[in-house]
Image (cartoon, rainbow, N blue to C red):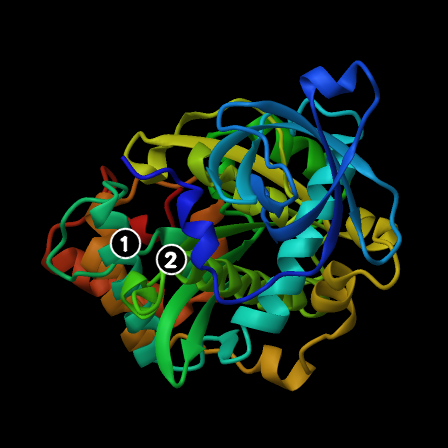
Amino acid sequence: MENKFSHIEKRKYRRKPTSVAVRSLKEAKRGLWKRAKALDLSDTGIRISLREAPAKGSRVHLSLKSEQGSRRRRVDGKVVWKKGLECGIQFENLRGTPNNEKLLFYMGDRMCEFVVKSAGSNLVALPVTTLTEHKAAYRLMYREYLARGYCAKHASKMYYTSYSLLPTSRTFILKQQKHLIGTLSLFVDSPCGLPMDHTAPEVTGQLRFQGRRVAEASLLALDPNAFREGTPPLTYAHRLAGSFWLFKTLLDYARQIADVTDLVVTVHPNHEHLYRNLAFKSIKPATPYVFARGHLGLPMHLDVRELEAHLPVGTCFKKFFFDNLLPLDQLAKTYRWTPVALSDFINKRQAEWPQMMQGAVEWLKRRYPLVAARTRQKSHKTSGLNDKGEPQLSFVGI
């Protein structure tokens, strides 16, 4: 089986230079360090070049420092491949390293620099503005989630949840040369709650009690067909760039329009590294997630205001996510559901959604009066009534 680091040597884009000092465990006793050149750096490993590369399987100490003059970060690793003067080193104890959050941010900032300069120049992320874009985003969601077993087959060939249709929710799309290649949704807290109320209700409840404005990032999908050209490293790099651009637009909207203070997300444990690059922190162990058909979901949290306040000035992360804001007119231009379109989306999937919390139905009836009336008429025709003979507006379920 091909080693997951062996493809690094083919990368076409060079990342930000990083000063590296390396020593093997044998040399550690004598305090000897060897100077090395970083050829590639990610959140899971590094490719280096030095005069005498350690043998495959060797365990080494690394001391990393960027050219911007930040303090050195210490981490241990294992050599997983060697070719000539170059070798690939997999980080072993990143989470157990002292000041690991600073080290993780350091990695994330290096990734951000690469994304902005090398892989994201032809990508554009904006809020959905038309019904056609909504449908295209939900079709992409369906294809990707169905392939991973996160959703069941459906005649509509679209995947969305009841949260997607709430008046406080927004869908964002990623385009490359006018082709839709990615999507991400933002669910702002409302009387209908959030998806994370199913996995970590104590966390969302505590944030609400503190008066925080909470929102959940959800339904991230990228079209793999858009990234097949080029070498495998470019595939990963451009997918990472797509994720960064989608989250940048979501964060701009959350801060400037929705006044969000905290973001939460539930992700598969295999994708935790991506969200750590985006400064999210895990808040409890992974548990079966109802919105992914029982696959594991890891709850994560990001304090938006704290992150902005403590980001070092001049870092790529701060410039990209907090300084270079999208214009308000672009963020405010979003699609507004019409009664006809929304009731159509409701009736496509309403039988699959569980009932919602007490009191939220009335809130949605006030926000969507025409849709409630239209749904009531269709409910009588299809016998979709509750025990009292009233229509079940299950599209607002959680």
58 or 91, nearer to the observer: 58
For the residue labelled by badge 2, is the local secondary structure a helix, a strand or a loop?
strand
Picture residue at 38% right of the left edge, 85% below the top = 178
Q: Position of residue 124 (x, y in %)?
A: 51, 78
Q: Which residue is mark 1?
A: 144
Tell which circle, 1 or 2, labels the residue nearer the N-terminal end: 1
Picture quadrant of residue 354: top left
Picture quadrant of residue 98: top right
For the residue labelled by badge 1, is the local secondary structure a helix, a strand or a loop?
helix
Mark 1–mark 2 distance (CA, rounded to whole Å): 7 Å
- Would you place residue 98 above or below residue 358 in this image? above
Q: Position of residue 31 (x, y in %)?
A: 84, 21
Q: Is residue 344 left or right of residue 37?
A: left
272 or 327, nearer to the observer: 272
- Would you place residue 356 above or below residue 361 in this image? above
Residue 236 seen in render: yes
Q: Is residue 319 left or right of residue 141?
A: right
> Dot 1, crowdedness within 10 Å: few (<14), some or many (≥20)?
some
Picture residue at 71% right of the left edge, 58% below the top = 17
Q: Position of residue 191 (x, y in %)?
A: 54, 47
Q: As shown in the figure, which amino acid type bears the numbered disc 2?
A: Ala
Q: Position of residue 265 (x, y in %)?
A: 53, 43
Q: As shown in the figure, which amino acid type bears the numbered disc 1?
A: Glu
Q: Quadrant of the C terminus?
A: top left
Q: Is residue 82 left or right of residue 253?
A: left
Circle 1/circle 2 CB separation < 8 Å: yes
Residue 391: image tag? none
> Dot 2, crowdedness within 10 Å: few (<14), some or many (≥20)?
many
Residue 221: image tag? 2
